[in-house]
Amino acid sequence: MGKRILIIEDETGLQITLEDRLLAEGYEVCIRSDGISGEDEARTEEYDLILLDLMLPGRDGFSVCQNLRKAAIQTPILMLTARNGNLDTIVGLKQGADDYLGKPFDMGILLARMEALLRRSAPGCRGRSSRAVSFGDFRLNLKTGELCRGEASIELHAKEFALLEFLVRNPNQMLSRDRILNEVWGYESEVTTRTVDVHVAKLRQKLGESELPRHIQTVRGRGYRFIP
C-alpha cells in the first residue's frame, strides 16, 4: 500500500495535475478543496503527508496548520502558495509547517521534498542509529525521534528533529547556515538561510533556552555551534 497523501488545494487544474502525478508515483491521494473540510479530513483520517495550500476558501492554510498542531496532529505538512516572501515562509514555519514551496513549482522538486519529509517522519527511519544521545538534561533517541527531559517528552516536528539530529552529530563545530541548510533540507531553491534561524529559534524555545542559549550557540556572522 502506498503512502497516503492529503491535498488541500482549491485550484482545480493543480488538483488534477497533483493527483495524476502522485497516483503514477504510487501514492494514495485524497483531495479537499477548502480549509474547513481539509482540516476535518486531517483530523479524522490518518495520512503520511499533507500538501496544504496557503490561500484557501473557508479557512486559510496558516490557520489549518496551526489548528492541526494544537490538536497534536504531527503529520508532516508541506505548504504550497502563490505568494512570495520570507514573511510568509516564517509565519508558515512558526505555525508548524515542515516545509514550504512557492508556486509555480517543478514537480520533481515537489516529489523530492515530499520524499525527504516522508523519510524523516517514518517510524524507525528517522535516525541512522538505534542509540540515544544525551546532552545536558536532555536525551534524544535517534531511532524514534523522541526528545526527553527527564521523564517529560518534548514534541518535535520532522524538520526540528532533523536539525537537532544534525547538530548533535556535529558537536563543538562551527556550522554555517549554508551547510545546515544543505545538510538538513538537502536542496537549494526557495528556502533561505533565514529558515535555519527560524528552526533554531523554535528548538531553543523547546529546550527552554530562548533567552540564554546553552546548547545551540550563535557564532556571530557565521552560523551556529552545538555544545553538548
Image: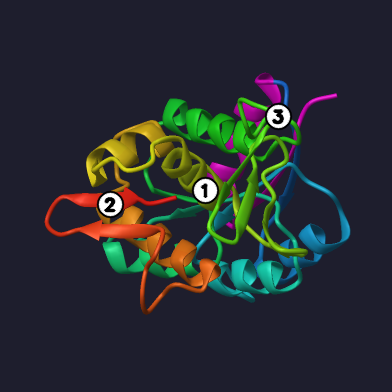
Residue indicated by mark 3: 130
Given residues 104 and 90, the one toward you in this image is 90
Give x and y (percent) for residue 159.
52, 48
**Amino acid on which the number 1 mark rests in the picture:** Lys
Tell me the SS state at disc 1. helix
Asked if residue 91 lies left or right of residue 136, the reply is left
Q: Are marks 3 and 1 in contact (CB under 8 Å)?
A: no
Name the colouring of the figure: rainbow
Closer to viewer: mark 3 or mark 1 = 3
Dot 2 alpha-carbon crowd within 10 angstroms: few under 14, some 14 to 19, many 20 or more: many
Tell me the SS state at disc 3. loop
Residue indicated by mark 1: 159
Given residues 13 and 172, the one toward you in this image is 172
Mark pair 1, 2: CA separation: 17 Å
Residue indicated by mark 2: 224
Given residues 35 and 115, the one toward you in this image is 115
Give x and y (percent) for residue 104.
37, 43
Quarter of the figure with the N terminus: top right
Q: Residue at x 25, y 59 (%)?
A: 218
Q: Are marks 1 and 2 in contact (CB under 8 Å)?
A: no
**Amino acid on which the number 2 mark rests in the picture:** Tyr
